[in-house]
Amino acid sequence: MLPRGWCSLQRASYRISRASLISPILRLGPPAPRPPFFTRQSPPLRRYYSEMADYGFVDGVERLDKYAPGGFHPVQVGDKLKNRYEVVDKLGYGGWSTVWLVHDSQEQRYLALKIGIADSLPREVPILRALGAQPEAPGFESIPHLLDEFTVSGPNGSHPCYTTALALCNLRECSSSQLFHLDVARAMAYELVLAVAYVHSQKFVHGDIHLRNILVHSQSSIDKLSIPEFREEYGEPESYEVERRDDQPLTSNVPSIVTAPLYMGKKAKEFTLQEARIVLSDFGESFSPDTDVRLGKDCHTPIDFRPPEAFFEPDTPLSFSADIWSLATSIWDILGMRALFSSAFYSEKQVMCQIVDIIGPFPDKWYKNWEDRDEFFNHDRQPKEGRHVWPGIEQAFRDRVQKFRGEANMVELCAEEEAAFLDMMKRMLKYRPEERYTVQQVLECDWMVKWARSDYERSRSSKA
């Protein structure tokens, strides 16, 4: 098991001293704060932050200035909520919530507890409730389910809380510069499609499919550990004492100790087929097209995974086909080392150029409305001389998937499987949303039926 992470400290108005010292490793930074997952029922948080503008932050933890009226609830390891959930460690945080690893004394198991900012209504809660309607349907077990809901009151207000089953890590964390074994990648891809199929069958669009929102199931063996045994396995919390720079005492709004998130995952290549269990998480961007109009301009999916109609048709409602584009790019990421489209070191307009180079020319209307086209293409729609041209999808697959699998001494896709995989990708990545495969067609395509499904079924057997 990897040791706990190391957080560098940025000293501003808080002085931070180590409360514990754990072996350091390089920590992958958390994603930037997302658009609101909550519908505000009180004035915006900035009303309160102005009074705490001098507070700094500890790199690797949530912003301390959000511990204010209307903001985060101050939680510390060892706290017990609802006289039932003992806080064991932190799992993560965002702009609108903190997430904690808790031990449920009633059920004797470890869970994830999300605590929202004060006086807020979590957007994903009613969606998760609705998604709990058909527990026998395929894909049901691959989405999170609400186990308990309650509120907790504190110095910053009344906070919504809910628990879900524990997950170990997201696929982006464990696959950074790593490859999954081919059977593991196939099984994960198939289960991801099953999860999306279930969501669509319940008339919802997920709206934000990418590897950070695909989690790895925890193993039931963790629940057999007592809290001291858990500490022996995963280490003590990485905690920091909090002090004000002006030497004034802390108010009750701010925790006296802050904790960096625990990483419970492992390297991609270490996953066995039986451990290839995933959960499609984070329904804060989800919507039902029948009742909730979501325009392209309101799509917050990272640009690498975002369907192009969100860019070129900003005032057109999105639908289920938007998920299919994001699903395709996520499946590619699960199998390969390098993303199909990448904003790493590239601007948004360069990502658009990548899409054209790799997939093919945009529809005429999109191309004419693309303000940056002349930066990359001449009047004949050919790449301008001297610029880098990204390879088409066939060569990209060889360069970004097959090549790295071979160099890592991992099984590559045979010629027949490669052709089936690329055919699926092309059908999922059609520019016109109405021409894309539906999720049911993805499940029934050759690559899923002949290769991915068998590994998924083996991953569920006791002999995997």
Image: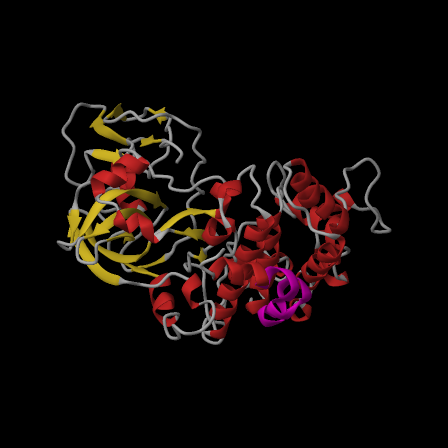
Check the image and report above or below for 229 versus 158.
above
Indicate left or right for 30 with 379 as reference: left
- Image quarter for residue 23? top left
Residue at screen point 42% across, 56% down: 282
Residue 78 is left or right of residue 284, and the answer is: left
How many numbered markers are drawn?
A: 0
State the predominant SS element of the stretch in magenta.
Answer: helix
In this view, which residue lies farthest toward the front?
463
Residue 286 sits in quarter: bottom left
402 over 116 or under it: above or below? above
Residue 345 percent location from the top left of the image = 61, 36
Side (left or right) of 40 relative to 156: right
For the residue pair 147 and 434, the one nearer the viewer reads as: 147
The stretch of residues the image draws in magenta is 437-453
In which quadrant is the N terminus drawn? top left
Q: Residue furthest right?
A: 380
Query: Could you tell me if residue 258 is visible in this image?
Result: yes
The residue lying at 20 percent from left, 37 percent from top is: 255
Res. 13 image quadrant? top left
Report whether residue 372 is seen.
Answer: no
Instruction: State the colouring used for the structure image.
Output: secondary structure
Query: Is residue 228 magenta-colored?
Result: no
Residue situated in front as seen by the camera: 300 or 103? 103
Task: Check if residue 446 falls in the magenta segment.
Answer: yes
- In depth, the one of 275 and 130 nearer the eye is 275
- Where does residue 309 sit, x and y in percent of width and height? 63, 61
The image shows residue 377, relative to residue 242, as above or below, that is below
Residue 183 in the image, given as x and y percentages of width and height: 58, 52
The x and y percentages for residue 340 are: 65, 48
